[in-house]
Amino acid sequence: MPVDTPDENIPTEPVAIDMAPAERPAHRESNLWSWSDLALLLVFAAVALLASNLFVTLGYAALKVLAGWNSSSPADQANPIFLLTMQGTFYGALFAFIYVLIVAVHGQPFWSSLNWRKLSAGKTLGYFLGGIALAVSVQLASALLPDKANFPLEKMFTSAQAAFALAGFATLVAPFMEELVFRGVLFSVFERQAGLWFAIAATAVLFGALHIPEYRGAWNHTLLIFLVGAVFSLTRGLTKSVAPSFILHFAYNLSTMTGLFFATHHFRTLQSVLVAAQKAALT
């Protein structure tokens, strides 16, 4: 009877086991932040602005009947609540478009694609204090320059309620959305297509241009807002992140509105302060 030996069924050659991970397919480079992305954004922004105006106007007309409002058109009196509601609606649509463009169209992560990086607590505090210092510097500089009162932004402070609404929007909404668009999307497109310094200069100029209608005729405020935008854009370029410019912007707006809040006794003497400023500007 044949007897199996212990090694009879063992291969004479060792079998090599490949432990290397399976080769992954090459990652296709994203074409996010091309000129075509910018063109899409501009087209959508124009359509969204018109649509939000129409939407809020129709809503205002419906509410006017229920609330018994007397004004025939909210835009005729530059109604602050109407304007803020319209701008908030527009910002919401714009944010949704940017999210879809990055995540759905290009398949990229949202925050990192915008170069929005988390800051340490120490750096956050530093930029916050920097924003306060920037606001104080602008206030001191504006006091040294010839002024013009009764420009469009001042006319929106028609009451304490309007002032609170404007202050809330200026601190909680505007810094986030403006930094998202200017130092996030526009900066990324310009930097990728034309270089860092072009991105810094272009976003600073465009940011200032956005605020010209608010300060129409008041050249000193227009000049200062251009300089503020340059600080935000330079910070974005040097840090490679949108978060620092957002903190600066938030602290700047918060400081400005807080100063106005206390200067007008919690917005109760707002009109008297504006009238006094107008008289001082005429002398």
Image (cartoon, helix red, strand yellow):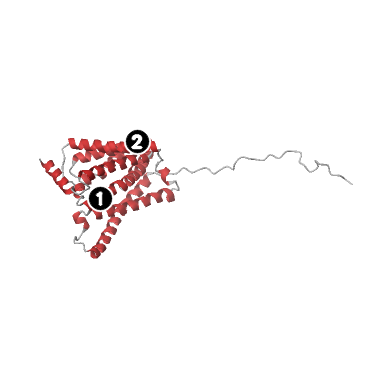
Q: Are marks 2 and 1 in contact (CB under 8 Å)?
A: no
| Residue at 23% from the left image edge and 53% from the top image edge | 161
Label 2: state its secondary structure.
helix
Against 115, residue 86 (above or below) is: below
Which of the two residues, 3 or 191, is positioned nearer the viewer here? 3
Hey, what amino acid is under mark 1? Answer: Phe
Residue drawn at x 12%, y 41% as measured from the top left: 280
Residue under pointer 1: 164
Is residue 199 in sight in this rendering? no
Within 10 Å of disc 1 (Cα), the crowding (few <14, some 14-19, many 20+) is some
Q: Nearer the viewer, residue 117 or 271?
A: 271
Q: State the separation of the CA atoms marked 2 and 1.
A: 27 Å
Q: Amino acid type of disc 2?
A: Gly
Q: x, y percentage for residue 240?
A: 38, 37
Rendering coords of residue 3 (x, y %): 86, 44
Q: Residue reaching furthest left?
A: 283
**Is residue 127 shown above or below 65?**
above
Name the residue beneath numbered marker 2. Answer: 126
